[in-house]
Amino acid sequence: MIKQAPNDQFEIAARNRGAMCIAGVDEVGRGPLAGPVTAAAVRLLPGRVPPGLNDSKALTAKRREALFGAIMEMCEVSIAHASVEEIDVMNILRASHLAMVRALQGLPNAPDYALIDGNLLPRDMPCKAEAIIKGDALSLSIAAASIVAKVTRDRIMVGLAQQFPGYGWDRNAGYPTKEHQLALLNLGVTAHHRRSFKPVHNILYQDKSVSS
């Protein structure tokens, strides 16, 4: 069975309800043990929609990179983050929603409607919005946002991997792979690890238990 590619049905429906400036929003980085959560907001412009947009998870890294360049060139784009500190203070769901709102607020033209990937709308939305489950596989705008967020965050983790070798962040993007979890045990916790996440918290707690 061939999976259907994302289309503009949600964007058309929003326009039919009177929306003039529509942005798709997605985030990446809820599951990793390290690094920020990154969100992107993308407004597709008439006649300037990059061909081949799809859920970032359905694309190869090479294809994502090529589409990232096309989206940045042809669309209105805003990228935002929530830091490790913010994730630990407010929890990963709230932090990812904060990054989404920041991304919307950073667009060059304030949107009057947002298509949000997921089943919950963030608090403090700057405009009307709807949440779309698996939106990155259904909406062209959200698919574009998923590509921008994924490529941006992967690049951040590659940069951090050079500063903190041994954790494999250039390969695992901070996700809890076996390599990453072994490195946590052997090399310890860095400033970029999320202390509220159980595998990191447990190592810190065990260290304190042993030393006390």
Image (spheres, grey):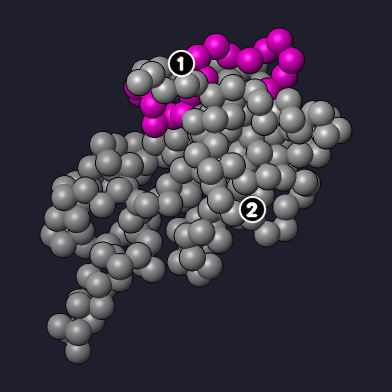
Q: Which residues are magenta?
A: 42-61
In the rendered image, which quarter is residue 206 located in? bottom left
Left or right side of 108 for 1? left
Q: In the rendered structure, does residue 63 fall within the stretch colored magenta? A: no
Amino acid at the residue labelled 2: Leu
Disc 2: CA contacts within 10 A as few (<14), some (14-19) or many (>=20): some
Residue found at x 72% / y 19% = 45
| Element marked by disc 1 | helix
Q: Quote the CA–CA distance across marks 2 and 1.
A: 30 Å
Q: Which residue is mark 2?
A: 121
Q: Nearer the viewer, residue 47 or 106?
A: 47
Left or right side of 28 for 161? left
Q: Nearer the viewer, residue 16 or 84?
A: 16
Image vertical order of residue 144 relative to residue 135, above or below: above
Q: Nearer the viewer, residue 106 or 135?
A: 135
Which x, y percent locates residue 26? 55, 40
Q: Which residue is mark 1?
A: 66
Which x, y percent locates residue 199? 26, 65
Image vertical order of residue 12 relative to residue 39, above or below: above
Look at the magenta stretch and give its main secondary structure.
loop
| Element marked by disc 2 | loop
Image vertical order of residue 62 relative to residue 21, above or below: above
Q: In the rendered structure, does residue 57 fall within the stretch colored magenta? A: yes
Disc 1: CA contacts within 10 A as few (<14), some (14-19) or many (>=20): few
Which x, y percent locates residue 41? 63, 36
In the rendered image, which quarter is residue 154 located in? top left
Residue found at x 81% / y 39% = 112
